[in-house]
Each structure stands twice: as C-alpha cells, then as structure tokens.
Image: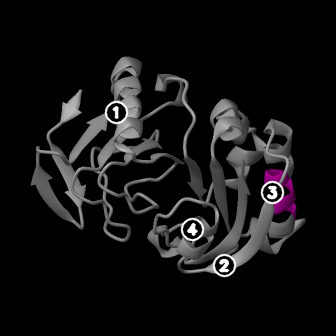
Amino acid sequence: MFVDKFIQNNEVTSGGERSLMYDVGKDVLSREIREARERGGKVIMEIGPGRTGGVALKKDDLYIGVEPYFEGEMSFSTNKAELGARVAVVSDVWQLPEFKPDLFLSIAPNPNDVDDGMLFDYENYIRDAGVVVVALDMRTREARSGSGVRGFEKKVRSDLQEIGRRRVESEVMSGSISGLMEDLGVDRACNLNSSGDLGGKGIVLSSEK
C-alpha cells in the first residue's frame, strides 16, 4: 500500500517523489531496494524508530523502519529527508525481503527486548550490513543499578559478535554522531537528540565491514 503523504519537518507534503510506504509487500520493497542502489543511494534500516527517523536522508536513499507501534506518520523533524528520498515502514521483520543494508541503526533499544534476544531477530541484516550503529540509553533504572549500562553494553557487544560482527567499537557520545557516521563510511547526519528515549547522550556501539 502506498501512502500519498510524507511527514517532513512537521509539514505534510503530498505525493510526488517524497512518499511513505507502510506494510508493503516484499516484492515492492525488493524493487525499491534495487532502484535505490541503481540511483546510488543508501539503503538504511532502523529498528524501533517510533515516529521520528534517526538519520538524515539524501535524495536517492531508501529508509526502512521496523516499528510494531507505527501510527501512520513518520517525521524527520530533527534529521531531514531530501526531496526524492523514499521511506518505508513495516510492523514486523518478517515482512522484509533479504537484503544487505548499508546502515543498520538502532537508537535506545529496550534492555528487556535485548535480553529476550531482539538483535537475533535481525541476525541476517546485522551480519550483512555495511555498518551497524546501536546507541544505548544511559538514563534508565537499569543503567544505574546492578550490572548497569556497562552490563547492557557488554550484552549488546556479545550479541553483535555472536551474530558475526567481530570488531565492535564503543564510546560515550552526546548530540551529533555525524562525524562517527562519516568515519564509518556513511555520510549521513545523525543526532542522538532525535530520540526522546535517549536524552541526547548514550553509549554508541559501532561496527563496519
């Protein structure tokens, strides 16, 4: 199903090259992925974006969000999307075709979901992605008690390595992580302030092929 409205900078624009696709079939997504690559764009996959995408998009990019609680809108109010960018949101990973994201992104994943093996639900995409970036919340009760955020970091690192990301770096970062993204070969703006769940500061784990 194509939706003829795209939410950008809190303004609704209709149709044209900017469009939001929701729960489309694998065949449609496969075509969009192929066309984005032919245009020279990046294929970006984000897990749990809510209603705000966590990365800026250039005109030939394809953004795929996996969000079970999606409510029909996608805002890039913090991280803009250029005219020509394509955006798709699915409610379940099983709706996706097999592909290799240029960037696999997750900002402020729920610790309980990670403990339940969430990252392994996306195993193939994480293993094959050009770049993986996972930003962890440092403000929650879990981050300040027990094994704390360092234990959470250790769990995420271990899961990523078990999936096949042998080299995983981490550092505490605030605000923009665009410089890190550029260093990783994904020249797209990304700001931790885009996530209300993160508070603009987090431990950022990254891995590149």
**172 on left or right of 54:** right
For label 1, the residue is: 35
Q: Nearest the camera: 167 or 66?
A: 167
Q: Earlier in the sequence, mark 1 or mark 2?
A: 1
In the image, which disc is placed on residue 170?
none
For label 3, the residue is: 168
Q: Residue at x 41, y 33 (%)?
A: 33
* C-alpha gap between disc 3 and disc 4: 16 Å
* C-alpha gap between disc 4 and disc 1: 23 Å
Q: Residues within 10 Å of mark 3 (few under 14, many from 20)?
A: some
Q: Residue at x 79, y 37 (%)?
A: 163
Tell me the kind of residue under disc 1. Glu
In the image, which disc is placed on residue 182?
4
Question: Residue 204, position in %: x, y?
Answer: 69, 67
Q: Earlier in the sequence, mark 4 or mark 1?
A: 1
Magenta residues (range): 151-157
Q: Earlier in the sequence, mark 2 or mark 4?
A: 2
Tell me the kind of residue under disc 4. Glu
How many discs mark residues in the rendered view?
Answer: 4
Q: Residue at x 43, y 53 (%)?
A: 50
Instruction: Using the rendered view, name the quadrant where residue 140 is placed.
Output: bottom right
* C-alpha gap between disc 1 and disc 2: 34 Å
